[in-house]
Image (cartoon, rainbow, N blue to C red):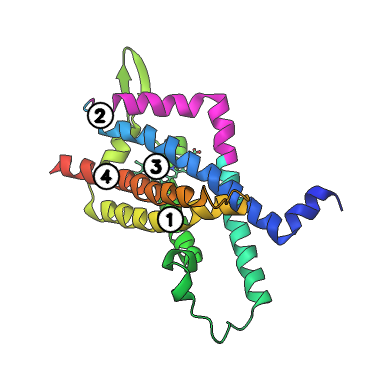
């Protein structure tokens, strides 16, 4: 067996896959948020539609996008494998252990939170990504060039209060998932140091509040604009 397959078959290797894919997805979230915040510009979606078109046609971005889907899949598959391994190695919970005393609610519920985020993602991809790639969507013309009007699809979706509520609640789940996942990824990579760990922890908490809050703000503001 080569050292590569040996590494990825070990428990540490599997954790490494979880943390590396998780960190990539965290990076994706920042880029995705930056692009999506253009939805709030007072230009009837022009900047966002041109940006979406560039993202959809740029070869490098398309390759990164395939990597993104592959990393989401790996992150989910390895989380299932690791949960099963954990259960196998400790079929009966420690009699005296009181996990609520020493670990956070988020860390105990990463599987549930991850599942809820996966459900959000499937609904989200069907409504936006699938429509953008394969649906028949309206067009908009800027400077004589025709673009897909993704802004129209997003605005339509966020005119429904139930859809907005679904997004806001899901961003809450994302926040809790990130609040444990961020620092945990660095720890698995061996980047825990008496000096830097508290800082990584604080940055993780800040990140897990600010990023989901900004994501949640987009449907909320767009809904308010329709009133
Ligand atoms: C207000 C919040 C959000 C809005 C308005 C939004 C909007 C969109 C739109 C319009 C697309 C299709 C066009 C494109 O590929 O760029 C898309 C794709 C996608 N979104 Fe979101 N999104 C939001 C939040 C999220 C969140 C929180 C996640 C992850 C947890 C996410 C994950 C994805 C993924 C994985 C894709 C496919 C990207 C690809 O083609 O590689 N989105 N989103």
Counting residues from the start of the chain, the first of labels 4 and 2 encountered is: 2
**Secondary element at tag 3:** helix
Vertical arrangement, residue 157 with respect to residue 170, above or below: above
Give yes or no for residue 63 being in the magenta stretch: yes
- Nearer the N terminus, badge 4 or badge 1? 1
Is residue 148 visible from the viewing direction of this image? no
User: Quick one: label 1, few (<14), some, or many (20+) residues within 10 Å?
Assistant: many
Disc 4/disc 2 C-alpha distance (Å): 13 Å
Mark 4 Cβ inside 8 Å of ligand 1: yes
Q: Position of residue 28 (x, y in %)?
A: 48, 39
Q: Which residue is mark 3?
A: 128
Magenta residues span 43-67
Farthest residue in the top direction? 144
Element under disc 1: helix
Inter-mark Cα distance, 3 to 4: 18 Å
Instruction: Locate the C terminus and report the quarter of the image it occupies.
Output: top left
In three-dimensional space, the C-alpha distance between marks 4 and 1, rounded to whole angstroms, equals 19 Å
Q: Say if disc 2 is inside 8 Å of ligand 1.
A: no
């Amino acid at each position: 067996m080569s050292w590569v397959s040996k590494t990825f078959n070990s428990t540490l290797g599997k954790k490494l896959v979880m943390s590396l894919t998780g960190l990539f997805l965290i990076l994706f979230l920042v880029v995705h948020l930056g692009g999506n915040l253009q939805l709030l510009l007072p230009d009837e979606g022009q900047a966002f539609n041109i940006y979406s078109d560039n993202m959809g046609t740029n070869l490098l971005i398309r390759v990164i996008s395939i990597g993104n889907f592959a990393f989401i899949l790996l992150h989910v598959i390895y989380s299932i494998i690791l949960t099963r391994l954990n259960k196998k190695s400790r079929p009966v919970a420690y009699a005296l252990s009181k996990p609520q005393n020493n670990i956070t609610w988020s860390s105990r519920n990463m599987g549930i939170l991850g599942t809820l985020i996966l459900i959000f993602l499937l609904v989200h991809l069907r409504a936006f990504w699938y429509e953008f790639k394969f649906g028949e969507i309206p067009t908009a013309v800027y400077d004589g060039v025709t673009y897909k009007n993704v802004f129209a699809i997003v605005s339509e979706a966020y005119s429904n209060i139930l859809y907005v509520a679904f997004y806001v609640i899901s961003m809450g789940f994302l926040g809790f998932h990130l609040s444990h996942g961020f620092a945990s990824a660095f720890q698995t990579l061996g980047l825990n140091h008496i000096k830097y760990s508290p800082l990584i922890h604080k940055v993780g908490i800040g990140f897990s509040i600010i990023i989901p809050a900004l994501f949640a703000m987009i449907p909320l503001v767009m809904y308010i604009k329709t009133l």
